[in-house]
Structure formats: C-alpha cells, structure tokens
Amino acid sequence: MISIIISARRNSGTHNPIRPRVPTTGGIATSLFRRVKRSWRSRRVRSMANCRASLLMPCKAVKTSNLCISNRTFTEAAGTRACGVSQPYRTAADRNLQRPVVQTLQATLTDLAQVRADALQSHDAQRHGYNALKAYLMLAEPGRTDPAFLKDQVLAAWPAQPAMSTGEWFDTSLRLASFYADHLKAHPEWRINASDGIVTASRNMLVNQIGLANADDTVYENVLEDAKGKYADASLTTLLNGADARGLFATARTVPGIYTRAAWDGMIADAIDKAASGKRVSGDWVLSGGSPAQSVGNAVVTTAAAIDGTRASDDLKARLTARYFAEYAAAWQGLLNSIQWQPAANLNGAIDQLTRLADAQTSPLIALMKSVQYQAQAGRPSQALTDTLVRKAQSLIPQGDFLRGVGSDDKAREFAVNPLDKPFGPLLALLGDSGTSANNAGTAANTPTALNGVSLARYLTVATTMRLKLQQIAASPDAQAMARSLAQAVFQGKLSELAQARDDAALTAASLGTQWAGFGDAVFARPLDTAWQTILQPAAASLNEAWRASVATPFRSTFNGRYPFFESNADASFAELGRYVRPDTGLIARFVTTQLAGVLKPQGDQWVPDELAPQALQFDPAFLAAIRQLSTLGAQLYAQGDAGYRFEIMALPSANVTRTELTVDGKPVVYFNQRESWSALVWPGNGLNGRAGLMWEMVNAGLRQAFDATGDWAFLRLLAQAQIKPLDSSRYELTWDQPDAAPLRYLLRTQVGAGPLDLLKLRGFTMPERIFMVSKAGAVPVLPPLPPEMTP
C-alpha cells in the first residue's frame, strides 16, 4: 500500500505550496500524481489551500504492478472536483475497470442475441443473460444502479490480471469493484454509451425466452421476500390455541408465516395491489426499456403491444393472487396431511381418547378445525352491510342483464371472492361454512357442499356414541365376552351400533376428498378405527382359537404323516378329506359361513374378503390362500358328492417302443403304436382297486415295468414322477423318462381345471393356525394413507 504523505509549511503567515512525495511506481499512479503536481503549480494554489482539509487528507491506495486507483471515498472527491482529483480517477477507472467489464458484458449479450428463437435455454442460462443485460444497462443509466448487484456482476465480468496472484487479485478487485459500484449512481458522468443494437437484440431474446412469466416471478418473489421473517410460522401447537392434543394426534411440520391469514391481511394483499397498480412498484425495466415509473402491465405493453394497461394490471393481480393462494393451500395441505393419530393400547385408553376428542369445551379437534376455518377465510371480502345489500340486489337482477352492465373490474372481483373456498371447501363444509360466495347466485354452483348428514357436529356425536358403548363394555362384569359378542356380530354380517359409528367416521373422512385424505384419515377415521380395534382384537384372537380348535388341529391330526401331505407310504382318506373341503357340508365351508360371513363372501368356487366389510383387521395371507385352494379343490373333486375326477388319457408314440400299458385303478390303457385315441377315466374309483402301473416293451426287449403302486393315491404318486407340460387350459403333456429307453409320453385332457393334477398341490400342504394377524401387543399396526403429493 502506498500512502501520500502530506506536509505543510507556514512562512510569515503565508501558505507554502504543499508538495507530495511522488511514488516510485509507474503507470496510473505516476500519471495521477503528476496531474496533481501540475495542478498545485497552477494559478489555483490559493484555491488548493482552501480545499486541502478535505482533499489532501492522508489516504490509502490500492497498488498492483500496473494498477493504482485511489480508494478515497467519493463523497470527498465529488466535493473537490475543482482540485482535479475526480477526473484522474475517472480516467484510470475507465481504462482499467470499466472498459474490460463492458467488453465482457457486450460479448455475453452478443452471444445471447445469436441464440435461436425456438431454442429454449435453461433457467440458469436465462438468468445469466438477464443479469448481464441488467448490469450493462446500469452502466449506461447510473440512476438505476443497485450497488450490491452491480458489484457482483463487475467482479464476474472483470478479467483477472495475469501478473497478479489469485488471492491478491481477489482482494484488489473486490475493493475496487465495491468502490465503483457504491459511487456510480452519484456520478452520472461515468455512464457508458450502450450499443442500442446489442441492447435491443438481447432484450428481445430474453423477452422471448423468459416472457411474461419472468416478470410475474420477479414481482411475486419480491412480494414474498418483503414479508418473510415478519410473521411466525403456524404449527399444530399454535393452531390448537391451548387445547391439549398429547396422546391424540401430532405433527412436527409447520406452515411458513408468509402463508398465514395474518400475513395476507397484514402485508401480502396490499403488496399485490401495489405491484399490480404500478403506483409504487416499477415493472421489469430490464426487459421493457421504459422509465422507472412504468408498471409491470406497461412493460407487457412494450413487449407485446396489445394489452390495455388497466386490464393488464387487473390480470397481473389475478395471476399473483391465484399463485399465492395455490401455494397457500398447498402449505396447509402439507401440514394437515402430515398429522398422525396415536392409537391407544387398550380399551380404557380408547375411551379416554374419544372422551377428550369429543369434549365440547376442550376438544383439540374442535380447536384445530376452528383455526383452519380462520386461516381458510383469508382473502374473503368484508361482510359489511353495504356488501350484503349489493349482493342481494345483484341476485334480483337477471344474470344476462347484470353481466352486460359490468366490466373487467367486476369479473376480477368475482374471481377474487373466496379464493380458498375451493381448496378448503371440504373442510369448511364440515363446519357449515359454505363461503360468502354462496350468497351470490352466479357463483353458488361452484361452492363446495357437504355430503348429506356429514358434519363436524355429526362426527362428534358418532364419537360420543362409540365412547358410551365402549364404556358400557368396560363396566360390564365380563368385558371380554361382551366385546367378543359385539365383534362376532360384525364377523357374522350382523348390524351393530359400533360398526355403524365406524362407517359414519369413514364417510366423514372420505368426504374430504383425496387432497385432504391424510388429514381425514388421521383425525376422523383412525380415532374410531383404533377404538374399534380394542374390541376386534380380543374377538379376533378368540376366533383364531376357535378356528385352531375346530379345523386346524383336527386337520393336522387326521392327515399327519399321510400322503400327499407328507411323503409317506400311508395314504390319506378321500372320505376324511371330503369332510373338510366339501363345498357345502365341509367343516371349512360351515365355519366360514357361520363365523365369517360378514367379512368373507363367496366368489365362484372361492371365498374372498368382502371389500364392503370393515377392514380394521388384517387377514393372514396364508389363511386366504389355504381356503382359496381347498374350496376350489372341494368344488371340483366332490362335484358329484363322492371324490372323483373325470378326464381322458391318450398315449403318444416313442422311438423303439412297440407297446405301452398304463393302468389306473384296474382300467388299462394299452397302446401298440397304432393310431392314437383318447381313453376316458375316472379317478379315484370305488376304492376297491386302488392301483397304478406303467409298463412298456421295446423291439429288442421284452415287457418292462416302469412304475407300480397300490392305494387310493397310487395314480397321484405316478403323476408326481412325470414331467408335466401345459399345452392349453385343458391339455397337459406327461413324460416319464426311462434310463435305458426313450421317454414315455401321454396326453391328459381334463374337464374342469387341471383335473387330478390339482391334487399335486396338496404335497407339503399345512392348514394355517390363524385367520387374522393379531400381535401379542393386541393391535396390528395399520399405516395411514400417503398424502396426495407423495402418491405414486
């Protein structure tokens, strides 16, 4: 750093010339000091003495190998232009700072202007070009200078000095750019002569690339930026207004303060009005090229030259308002849909939850809904008497005549009425709030209405009904037995007050629609679901035990160690199997029809869950798969009362094999390489000739036996050794490989399903021990639905 050492000598009361110590560095510093030296030797020595208190104070200079510009504050230099210092700085700054920066900006804008009009650039490329044009125009119009912005652009566009290190250049350029940007606005004579061609071409390209949306984005972001930090975020705690929701529902999510009614009433509404009217907030002068007093609407006029200023202002206000309230509604949906219900662990806990939830004085649900209603009324017009009278008068005027008498202003006001009624409509409908627009005959059709009989008051009544019924169960001498009887009524398809209460709660949650599905499930459906769980869980456990005792355990005892359920020489009895799987009189069918008729329904030959039944309990998938398999098997195997499959067999020729013989329960199917034909069979037979065998004969060998077994399941044992290839829905190719001969091939054609091949699925089959998945803790965790923005 170089310091200019100032000394003053006084002789006999007269001022002696003040001589500076000239630095030994060359370049700009030498030129600057020589100019100052010559000015001291001029005839203005006396004027020089008068201003030395402000001009010749000791200062610091920024030194480089070829760069030296004084960093004296320009408030001093501007006041002493007569002393000759402002002009030397301007000359040095013009040559070493302004020109290189301008050249870089012009190159950037030239490249921007050459972009194809139909080639959409990325957002970053658009912003880079926009910033370059804005900085270029600031240099041409110092009155528009934004020092912070210009400093960043100058630093980005100023080429580095190759003779300087990176750190030295960063420090030097930062100080010089800051000084220049801070004082440019006060010195309009430093302006550059901007190229009209470059400005016009780059501006047109940016308008084509960014368009009207950029102007809207700029104004909208400025409106929100001004309001940020001035209003507190809305959390669940603040919305409850002192009500206690601990142990009921909770969420850690918040709504930003700018999306609250306080922000709208306090700042946002006025800011949008001012931005649209253009009385205080200017338009995008970078794209419009107009004076600072232009509005955003006039900027659009400059580029599009087709929209009236007043109409453009109204349209801009409508766009900004619609965008704000869309983000407003999304922020509140995010908070409310993130609420999670905290299920009770037992019956007493469920009673306590419903008591607190439905309490008319301290209910956190009521407090939450009232706060949501207050927030959802942001943007509504005042309910003054004059407004009411005007609306009543409008309702008396025919719609056609009324519309002919209004202009765009009235249409804009019609759009602005209750902007949140549509997104918040389902929530407001629960509170009986249909919005002020409901009073307007022209907009009443668009007002959301509640489903018949669905309201918050109705829901609280339903919750109270459930709570009283649970208290009755808890107070009974045998609470478990009473809870079990109520739940079994649901399982058996009988009506009950608890099932009706749960259905009403589910209807209330469903009335909110998909946009509020998470909120509706958490605070309306889940409270009664979890309370219902405290009753169903004991009943489900009891039903599981009944299934285990009456079906699963006897089935296991009957068929344990018997084929086909186990690889054993002992065969299972078809009569015993029928006792379980017959479609009408089997133990499984009777159990389902008497105990589960309310939650399962017949679908063809199978039992499937009833989608209209309460889904509070989760079926064990193994149970559903088992009854699906056994019910289908029973319907096909015992279609005629006794066990029996009807099917056909046809032998296929094999190389070097002259004769094959297949025997099924005493009926042979013999093939001598003649023309193939189908043979009808029924298996199992009468149980007296249970046997299956397969023999074959070759040209150079005698008759050989490939398989032979006895018993009711002998034919299934033979099928288990074959390779089975489905040909279509009713034909299967069976192949038995022989170690010293060609494979033996047969075709099997069935009448229903896969015929006897279906019984192969019984190998390794075990009867499930439970119907419902009931955890030891009592409740099965049921996850709430995802919010709409996260749904795939």
Image: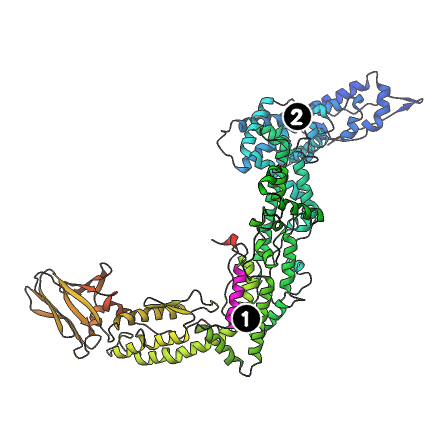
User: Residue 26: in sight, yes or no?
Assistant: no
Separation of disc 1 and disc 2 at Cα? 73 Å
The quadrant of the rendering that contains the N terminus is top right
Q: Where is residue 222 in the image (x, y as percent from the top left)?
A: 65, 40
| Residue hosting label 1 | 531
Where is 655 relative to 558, above or below?
above
Tell me what residue is drawn at x 59 percent, y 57 percent.
429
Where is 323 relative to 703, above or below?
above
Tell me if mark 2 has few (under 14), some (14-19) or many (20+) residues whose alpha carbon lies within 10 angstroms of its own: some
Left or right, 772 with respect to 663, comes to: right
* Circle 2: element type: helix
| Residue hosting label 2 | 140
Mark closer to the chain start, 1 or 2: 2
Tell me what residue is drawn at x 47 percent, y 69 percent.
617
Check if residue 536 falls in the magenta segment: no
| Residue 3 occupies quadrant | top right
Check if residue 500 falls in the magenta segment: yes
* Circle 1: element type: helix
Q: Where is residue 535 in the image (x, y as percent from the top left)?
A: 51, 74
Q: Magenta region's main secondary structure? A: helix
Left or right, 126 with respect to 13, comes to: left
Where is 688 relative to 195, above or below?
below
> In this view of the protein, which residue sits in the foreground, 585 or 731?
585
Q: Position of residue 26 (x, y in %)?
A: 70, 23
> In this view of the protein, which residue sits in the foreground, 8 or 514?
514
- Residue placed furthest toward the right: 12
- Residue placed furthest toward the bottom: 477
- Residue placed furthest toward the left: 700
Q: Please state which amino acid type lies under the numbered disc 1.
A: Ala
Q: Where is residue 266 in the image (x, y as percent from the top left)?
A: 71, 47
Q: Please state which amino acid type lies under the numbered disc 2.
A: Ala
What are the residue bounds of the magenta stretch? Answer: 492-510
